[in-house]
Image: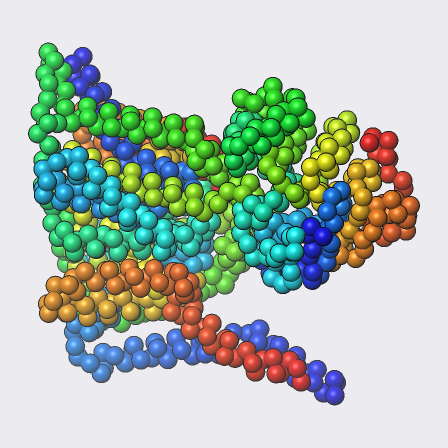
Amino acid sequence: MILSLAAVETFIGQFHILQDINLEVPEGGVTVILGRNGAGKTTTLRTIMGLTPPSRGSITYRGKSIKGLPPYAIARKGIGFIPEDQGIFTDLTVEENLLLSTRKKDDETKSRWHMVMDIFPDLKEKLKQKSGGLSGGQKQMLAIARTLLNDNQLLLIDEPSKGLAPIVVARLADVIRELKKHTTVVLVEQNFALALAVGERYIIIDDGSTVKSGVMSELGKNKELQRRYLGITAPSHGGKVV
Amino acid sequence: MDTFVNLTLNGLATGMMIFLVASGLSLIFGLMGVLNFAHGSIFMAGAYSGVWAYSKTQSFTLALLAGMAVGIVVGYLAELTTVRRVYGKPVAQVLITTGLMLVLNEVLKAVFGPNIIAVSVPPLLAGSWDLGGIIIVKYRIFTIIVGLVVAVAGHFILTRTRIGMIVRAGVQNQEMVQVLAINIRRTFSLVFVSGAALAALGGIMMAPALGAVNPNMGLENQMLAFIVVVIGGMGSFVGSALGGILVGLAGAYTAWVFPEASLAVNVILMAIVLLLKPNGLFGMGGGRNA
Amino acid sequence: MPDVSLPTRMHKIRGLLSLPRSSRTVPILLLLILVAVPLITPSRSMLNLLTEIFIMGIFAMSYDILLGYTGIVSFGHALFFGTGAYMTGLIFARTGPKLGYLFLAIGGGILLVTVMALIIGYLSLRLKDVYYAMITLAFAELFFIIAEKWRSVTNGADGFSFNVPAVLQDRVVYYYVSLVLLALIVVFLRRFIESPTGKVLQAIRENEKRAEFLGYDVLKFKLISNVIAGVVASFAGVAWALQQRFVSTGVMTVDKTIDALLMTTIGGTGTLYGALLGSGITGMAKNWLSELAKVHPIFERWYIIFGLLYIGIVLFFPGGILGTLMRIRSTKNKPSVTISAGD
């Protein structure tokens, strides 16, 4: 297992947001965290990253505890995080956003830079522009590009499809498939069609606790489970998009 | 015409001087969002220790170095012991740094005495040139040069270096900087200490211009610095420089027309800017209550 | 068993919700002691010191409305104190020591302070809270400079003295006058903070965003707080001028504001009584340390000790002396509460 959480509890202020999170993420592929709005999906990612530290439970990354470490130390271990709002520094140029993410100046970083430029040609054209001027989809691509610049082995992505047009979501699905070649991905996603298209495994969080996990293709068939925890009543209309 | 040129030169020099005092505050307050009420005390610590070093060595260069060294040490200790504990808590920051101000001011009085100490301009920079009615005071030119160097160097560091990039990114989203594996606390410590060094530099530069150092100079100049940062806009180093020049020029012209009002003009200028553009003239939008 | 315990439990809950009885007995007991002081000690200097503590206590309480109940730090509070003091001084110096003029001074002070508090508040309270600190400082300095420069009226830092109505000249009488004023203002401010407006202010202090979402006009409430604090501070200024029979620019200095800040923080913010306690401690300590300064000049730098004490309190005991005492007492009481909940 690359990442394991056991009996994790997190408070935000006086609110007991995460009550009992248990999850195992194997090496490789995409694990999708599903659940209703407010179930605690985002807080789970932020807790792993050390942004909202847990009060109880254990978090281990490659067998070593990362609980209580500051976010930058967790990031240095090779865990990348893309928040829901993408966390782009809009006052900085596209290039500066990318440069901030590079940690070394070696050949490997150079080759990664070229790789990123190949995957995202439209970013290459806008390197010198303020990133605040990018479209929503481009911002999401920039956020993903940032994480590809160093040897992240685990990537936490929070709702990347939010607010994106269907055509951009299709492109996003391609990019996530590309990501799989480089890193393990944990994805929080409300767009069930996208989750189904890119995910291998799923974990469902409800009311701050993990309630179910398994293989994605089985969840796709289990309408009862979808209705109960995800509030999906009809087959998702977005199925064709990806 | 001569009068106008003279006034403008005076105003520019004063403006640059104010910018020197404000530059440190611009870094600490404008970029980190920490309102450092001990800024004036660090400024004063620089001024007093610079004056002391000058009286011992007769070297203005050594005085500048000594003052800045004291600023760095005081800034480092302040950050390490107290300021670091209150990042992200604006009210606690104001309260803590006020305490630092009280302690520092009293320590300075205990070390250097509570009285006014006269300071003379170093011989090399003393005197003036008379160009057909236009009087150019050498120390003023020196001030303008030092101010320009600081402004250009600061702008360069903020826009062209990795540390500058981190600082600018941190202004926008501290959390995300950490997520990119950067220890922002360490960057903030560095910024705080740099701000303290600049405050101290402002103090030593100001001392010969005023002709004396006194225990009240800290708060007066801190206020002026704050006004300049507000006018210039949060998070803009260049804005602070332009704000400084604006305040300097406004002060110089008013002093000519109506001397009694020259002190009030700064506060009025600030009030007008706050009414019309609460984020300052060149700000990035950090000021308004979000 | 459940039907027996239900009424007692209800009773206990009600007991927990209402204020502890001691919150009223202590102040009343203290008031009685203070009433008795002039009967016990004939010491003029003691009465003067206590009078000073009462007046600075009023000033500190007005500061607590801002710091403790609204969560904003002012560095210009002395402006309002000074306005009250100058109003009193100038009116008595230019007219005569008649009691009627006192009401003119109070009324004029209220009017002027309200206008100033609204203007300064409007400029600064729309911005982040830290701006308030510096903008209030800037305005206080502006008026301080005006007072310094306008020597024909104020005589600057040298100040001027004046006569007050004969009845107020007696130290014992004035002691009682200031004690009554203090008691009235305690009652008034307690009513204010327990009023709906006061509750909204505290909600803003706790979470400004949430208060805004609930539909409260945050700026309006902060302005109200600014005006109330300013007016009460001007009362303290009036009382101060009457006691000193002398006004100089000293009443407008930042040091005055910082005194209030120290008193409130050391005593305990957000409690009103903490500000009074702070005034008492600071007043006594100042008196004592200035005596010591005659022994060794190092005690002239007593602000170092106060500054360090203050930093320690802000860092480690944010509730100040009173807040910390109250917390200790409530944790001491906790075991008995859990036991009663368990049975």
Q: Nearer the viewer, residue C100 or A82?
A: A82
Q: Nearer the viewer, residue C284 or B10?
A: B10
Question: Of all residues shown, which one is farthest toward the front?
Answer: A107
Q: On the rendered structure, is A126 left or right of B37?
A: right
Q: On the rendered structure, is B268 left or right of A10?
A: left
Q: How many marks?
A: 0
Q: Nearer the viewer, residue B171 or C36?
A: B171
Residue C300 location (% of width, % of height):
16, 62
Confirm whether residue C307 shows in the render: yes
Asked which colour scheme the image uses, the reply is rainbow
Q: What residue is shown at x 39% (from left), y 46% (from top)?
A: B189
Tell me if residue B269 comes above or below residue C139 in the rendering.
Answer: above
Tell me if residue A122 comes above or below residue C192 in the rendering.
Answer: above
Q: What residue is shown at x 79% (from left), y 48% (from top)?
A: A202
Q: What residue is shown at x 62% (from left), y 83% (from top)?
A: C340
Q: Quadrant of residue A86?
A: top right
